Image (cartoon, rainbow, N blue to C red):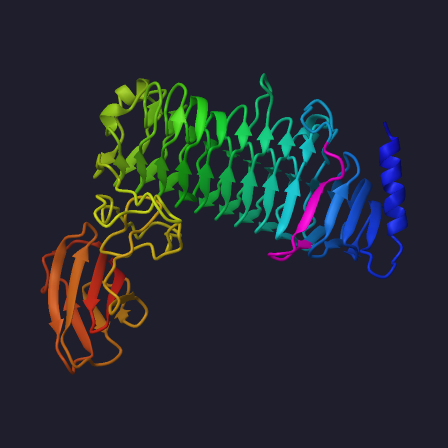
Amino acid sequence: MKKPLIVFLLLILLLNFNFPGHSQTILIQGTQSGLLEADTVLIAGNVTVPTGEQLKFKAGTMVLATGHFRLDVNGSISAIGEPGSPVIFSVADTAGFSNHENGRGGWDGFHFNGNDPLADSSVFLFCRFEYGKATGDSLEKMGGIFNIRDFGKISVSNCTFTNNYAYHWGGAIFAESGDISISHSIFQGNVCGQAAPPYGYGGAVCFRHSRPDISYCEFTGNISTGIGGAISLEYTDAMVTKNRFFENFSGLGGAMGYLRSAPDRMVEGNLFVNNSCLFFGGAIAFIKASPLVLHNTITDNQSSSYGGAVYCNDSAAPVIINTIICGNHAGEGAQLYIWDILSAPEFYHCNVQGGKEAFGGTGGIGYHSAYINNIDSLPGFLNNGPHPYSLQSNSPCINKGMFDPGWINYPDKDLSENPRISGILPDMGAYEYQIDLGSDLHIVSADINVRPNPFSDLLCIDLGRTYPVPVSLSIFDGRGILVHEAVIYPGAQSYRWNCNINSTTGNERGIFILTLSLPDSRVTKVVIRN
């Protein structure tokens, strides 16, 4: 059985000589640091990166493990590829990968354990990771590619994770006390867990006791046997923003499981489509978790049992705002299933198919939480183009969202990176409809100076120049109600608004939206009255 591998290694050794026209191949094991100047790097045994040292992989390098070997990182890793020349981490022989009882056919990934405060950050840019297989003893059965413990200085961007596996949790990435950043990356076909206990948490990514940033990623076809087909978050304060979740599967929470957490940061601007679960929550399962869920679109997900879109249990109390939950399917509670009366999700300015009357479960029948300014309408998705779940011009979700100036890190962009507030108020869902003002008219927002902001009673609007034609001014409150109109005549450069005299606001505080129609543009400004 070892003969093919021995022959393979002998051939590689012969090719390692630098004959003209030949690429260079090197073998590594043991203690390593510095730049690996080779086109192909063979990991022939476990590798250790010592404290204070860095191991570097250059763009275009193919890194192949010849067995179930790992990289223990006490220092740092730099693997920086390029768009057409990624750094690829894989295994030389995938035979046996589907056998989850041993390490055959895979490699053992990167292990970060204990954060050296003086260490450089580990950076992975434009990399591809495949056939990682976490099947060791106890703590080694987590994180097919990254097993991170008490290590926070890691950045992953523009990477692809595909066909990775963990016996327990985190098919591609597992982190315990790992405050890492993951952005603009693809997770596809990663798996974790067993058909019987221990069940898997996070088919692609699992975080515990962490504070990660997960943004602009795509999760497709990932599987967990327990909770969170793509992502599992436990005792965690995560920023989960502008990600796409398609066709992920789990027992609970087809795309995401959020457990035992009271996060300060948001689940914002994400798209959940065609995810599914066996039991509870086709898209998301909240178990004793209470995040702010803002500007998400959750549609066409399904559960074989309960909660086609969202499931809440064990005193879960997410605050769901400006979100579309429509077109999901389940045996009971097509959009939402609330297991217990202690779970109390709140809904503000959402489009929820069937309304609260259609909620399933004991907590759904006895629903007692806030349900304010929500609608029950067909969302009016565009259904074509690169963003089929953006809104048509006649969508009832346009200008129906809410904005609270107290929110920290309120987004300035939607999922397609267009401006978040295009009209008077934000729209519901992950996409903001962009107002079409014709080819000769466009929206700008930076040329007008409005001060002070926040203001008390008097607001000065400085146009920055004079115009030969009148400029119309409209001011709306946070509910979209017009409170003041004015005309700034030719030759005038500024306008003063005393909201106690020239408006219908009275003593109303909060957000106001100003729109000015200039000769060749429309300006939108948001101000706050304190």
Picture residue at 33% right of the left edge, 47% below the top: 390
Q: Which corner quadrant holds the N terminus?
A: top right
Examine the image and state in which quarter residue 64 appears. Answer: top right
Residue 128: in sight, yes or no? yes
Rendered location of residue 249, percent (x, y): 49, 28
Picture residue at 80% right of the left edge, 43% below the top: 43
Examine the image and state in which quarter residue 419 appears. Answer: bottom left
Q: Which corner quadrant holds the C terminus?
A: bottom left
Rendered location of residue 137, percent (x, y): 72, 26
Residue 118: in sight, yes or no? no
31 left or right of 80 in image: right
160 left or right of 414 in image: right
Name the one closer to the observer, 52 or 297: 297
120 left or right of 433 in image: right
Q: Give the range drawn in magenta.
A: 79-94
Q: Is residue 29 above or below residue 139?
A: below
Q: In this view, does 258 lie above or below 214?
A: above
Q: For residue 374: magenta?
A: no
21 left or right of 168 in image: right
Rendered location of residue 417, percent (x, y): 40, 55
Examine the image and state in which quarter residue 375 appears. Answer: top left
Q: Is residue 300 above or below residue 271?
A: above
Rendered location of residue 427, percent (x, y): 27, 48
Name the one closer to the observer, 15 or 231: 15
Q: Is residue 487 above or below residue 467?
A: above
